[in-house]
Amino acid sequence: MADQQTIAKVLVILTAAYPRQATTKETAMVYADLLADIPDGLLLVAAKHHAASSKWFPSIAELREAAGQIRARASGLPSPAEAMAEVMAQVAAVGYYGSPHFSSPLVRRALDALGGWRAFCASVEGMADRAHFLRIYGDLLQRREQADGLLPAVRAEVERVRDQERRATVKYLEQEADLALTVDRPIAARALQVTAYDSLRAFTESDTRV
């Protein structure tokens, strides 16, 4: 993680790139505190990237955002166009009854938002579905980049709330399945059990870092 020496080096680079911007000791302390969780090399690259692409001295938020974007690209996450190409390749390879494989759980999450793999394969609205997929996947990718830029304490709180929501969702589905069994609706109960399982799997996959 970024230490005082790295933060000092970052500020030297930025003040050299933006000579009109004066930095105080207090500014350096705040930057050091709020950027300390970013790895040294990543923070230096983020600072250089910003200096090469913006006319203005970066705020802490801009440096964190740049670091998140670089991390996402380095992780090998496909772009929306690449993700769409993966989906169409799997449609051709395994089809409606097959089990597709994707390079990132984000691809499957985008498909799940459209009703799942089989719904996508069976749809007659091919062009519209592809447009919706690109939009949904793009949103998921942007949220992933933004999450990478969150402070550790904020990220932990987001995960805590998200975990509570996940548990509540699965518990509700399980209770509905139990209720369906008590009124002799085995097919509905089975469907709810499958939905609960799929929801739990989706929640687990959404946390997988690739």
Image (spheres, rainbow, N blue to C red):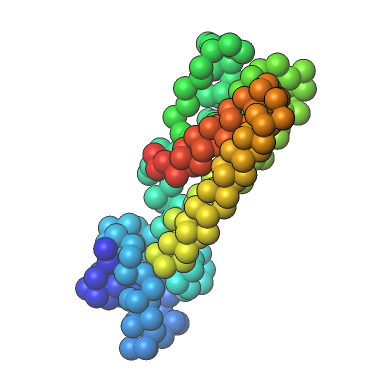
Q: Is residue 5 visible?
A: yes
- Left/right placement of residue 161 relative to residue 46 reads right
User: Quadrant location of residue 45?
Assistant: bottom left
Q: Is residue 91 above or below residue 115?
A: above
Relative horizontal placement of residue 172, taking residue 200 as reference (left or right): right
Judging depth in this view, the residue of 197 and 28 nearest the camera is 197
Height in image: 70 above or below 44? above
Q: Residue at x 57, y 50 (%)?
A: 168
Image position, residue 124 (x, y; %): 77, 18
Q: Nearer the viewer, residue 199 or 118?
A: 199
Q: Quadrant of the N terminus?
A: bottom left
Name the foreground residue: 120 vs 39: 120
Which residue is drawn at the image coordinates 59% and 38% (left, top)?
Answer: 174
Q: Residue at x 67, y 36 (%)?
A: 179
> Where does the image place residue 74, in percent across and percent down from the top left?
38, 44
Q: Is residue 58 at all visible to an observer of this figure?
A: no
